[in-house]
Image: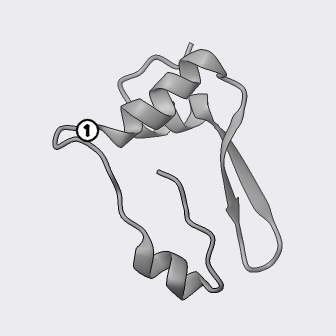
Amino acid sequence: MVLTKADSYEAVYDNFTWDFPATFNMGVDVCDKNAEATPDKVGLIVAEEDGTATEYTFTALKRLSNPSWPTC
């Protein structure tokens, strides 16, 4: 997935498409692989309207998306 430069958000949105196989697990491909390679790297930042932000590492995302995964 590569975004094409555009003059507006609407133009980017209108021209965006996903290109992935019929059987694909985004959680495994993004969270799990990165949790193994770079467990402490920030994978998601949730920014709130009040200016606060919460950061989640790839390991935290893996744990949140797969509760059966061990915490230790």
In the depicted structure, whether residue 54 falls above or below residue 67: below
Q: Nearer the viewer, residue 57 or 18?
A: 18
Which residue: 61% across, 78% down?
6
| Quadrant of res 51 | bottom right
- Residue 20 location, x and y as percent? 29, 45
The answer to whether residue 66 is visible is no
Q: Which residue is mark 1?
A: 24
- Residue 39 location, x and y as percent? 65, 22
Q: Residue furthest left?
A: 22
Q: Is residue 36 left or right of residue 17?
A: right
Q: Residue furthest right?
A: 51
Q: Nearer the viewer, residue 21 or 58?
A: 21
Q: Secondary structure at mark 1?
A: loop
| Quadrant of res 52 | bottom right
Which residue: 36% across, 64% down?
17
For label 1, the crowd category at 10 Å Cα-Cα, with few meaning under 14, some 14 to 19 and many 20 or more, is few
Which residue: 42% across, 69% down?
16
- Residue 26 location, x and y as percent? 37, 41
In the depicted structure, whether residue 25 falls above or below residue 13: above
Which residue: 38% across, 31% down?
28
Q: Nearer the viewer, residue 19 or 67?
A: 19
What is the count of numbered marks? 1
Inspect the image, locate mark 1, and give the three-letter code of the amino acid beneath it.
Phe
Q: In the rendered view, how is the structure colored? A: one colour
Considering the image in quadrants, where does the C terminus appear? top right
Q: Is residue 8 left or right of residue 1?
A: right
Q: Is residue 46 left or right of residue 51?
A: left
The answer to whether residue 58 is visible is yes
- Residue 34 location, x and y as percent? 56, 26
